[in-house]
Image: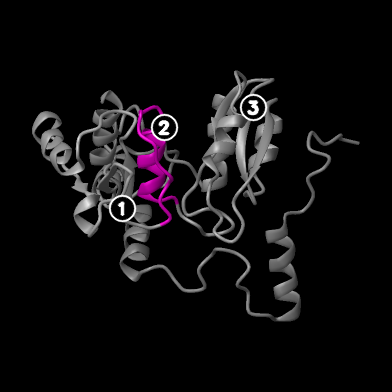
């Protein structure tokens, strides 16, 4: 009898609930597959290409026109620039892609940080690679990442941090605030990560004692980075020295701004 490499892994909850839904003739909202047909033009195009002879083994990385289209979509929708030859690999599904990434990156003894509740294929993939999953719970109700707990969990053995947005299974998303604040972690500013969606206040009192209205103008001219002085919104200016930054910007712009702020 074959001995399983993953004796603790049984039938997934997705398979169990879909089977139960079929048995009970229930509305199945348990799995993330659509219950409607693909667009007719897509089906027609697939049939046309199959009939034209495009039905054999594809290149291991995927056919080049598809990889080029993935690059175009990533640039258009996510602001990410990729090389179709060296940075794009087509996989048969998300779970398979996760497995390939883990197996290619994780060595025996490595640690991989995952966020609970986490997709149930992460830990089996990590175990098969000889690694160990380090579980960090997301915050209650909001299902956000506690970045301080992440920092404390990182060791010399940490190889990967698996992040997906929207998160599976909670559906929560990482915001531009997460990106901006993480990039500022090594700066001299003090701040509390924003719970909103547009603005971040940075306390610069440990850096200079210049009034915020003057500092905002000076830094715009000197560093090419504009912000809003918070004191203009008060009748009596606060004791804290705050500048307000808007993070409803592209990832490239936010990372460039964070690089500038980390040099100040």
Q: Is residue 169 left or right of residue 181?
A: right
Foreground tag (1 vs 3): 1
In the picture of the structure, the residue carrying the numbered disc 3 is 111
Which residue is painted at 60% across and 18% down in the image? 156
In magenta, the rendered stretch is: 174-195
Q: Between 222 and 137, which is closer to the camera in this rendering? A: 222
Q: Residue at x 28, y 29 (%)?
A: 259
Specify which label sits upstream in the sequence, 1 or 3.
Answer: 3
SS type, badge 2: loop
Return the residue nearer the eye: 46 or 118. Answer: 118
The answer, for residue 88, to whether it is visible in the render is no
Per the rendering, the mark at residue 252 is none
Q: What's the magenta bit mostly, secondary-structure-wise?
A: loop
Q: Secondary structure at mark 3?
A: strand
Does 55 appear in magenta?
A: no
Reply yes or no: does residue 181 show up in magenta. Answer: yes
Confirm or deny contact between disc 1 and disc 3 (CB under 8 A): no
Cα distance in 3D space between marks 3 and 2: 22 Å
- Residue pointed to by mark 2: 185
- Residue 113 x %, y %: 60, 35
Circle 2 residues within 10 Å: few <14, some 14–19, many ≥20: few
How many neighbours does mark 3 have within 10 angstroms: few (below 14), some (14-19), or many (20 or more)? many
The CA span between labels 1 and 2 is: 17 Å
């Amino acid at each position: 009898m074959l001995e399983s490499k993953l004796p603790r892994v049984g039938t997934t909850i997705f398979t169990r609930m879909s089977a139960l839904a079929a048995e009970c003739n229930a509305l199945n909202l348990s799995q993330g597959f659509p219950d409607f047909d693909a667009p007719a033009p897509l089906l027609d195009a697939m049939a046309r290409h199959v009939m034209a002879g495009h039905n054999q083994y594809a290149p291991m990385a995927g056919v080049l026109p598809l990889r080029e289209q993935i690059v175009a979509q990533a640039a258009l929708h996510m602001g990410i620039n990729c090389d179709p030859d060296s940075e794009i690999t087509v996989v048969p599904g998300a779970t398979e892609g996760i497995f390939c990434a883990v197996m290619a990156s994780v060595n025996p003894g490595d640690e991989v940080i995952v966020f609970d509740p986490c997709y149930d294929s992460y830990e089996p993939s990590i175990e098969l690679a000889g690694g160990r999953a380090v579980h960090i719970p997301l915050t209650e109700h909001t299902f956000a990442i506690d970045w301080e707990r992440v920092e404390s969990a990182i060791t010399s053995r940490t190889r990967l941090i698996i992040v997906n947005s929207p998160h599976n299974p909670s559906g929560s998303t990482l915001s531009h605030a997460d990106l901006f604040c993480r990039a500022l972690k090594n700066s001299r500013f003090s701040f509390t990560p924003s719970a909103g969606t547009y603005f971040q206040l940075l306390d610069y009192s440990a850096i200079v004692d210049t009034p915020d209205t003057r500092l905002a103008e000076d830094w715009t001219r000197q560093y090419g980075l504009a912000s809003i002085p918070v004191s203009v919104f008060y009748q009596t200016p606060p004791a804290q020295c705050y500048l307000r930054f808007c993070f409803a910007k592209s990832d490239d712009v936010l990372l460039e701004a964070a690089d500038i702020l980390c040099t100040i």
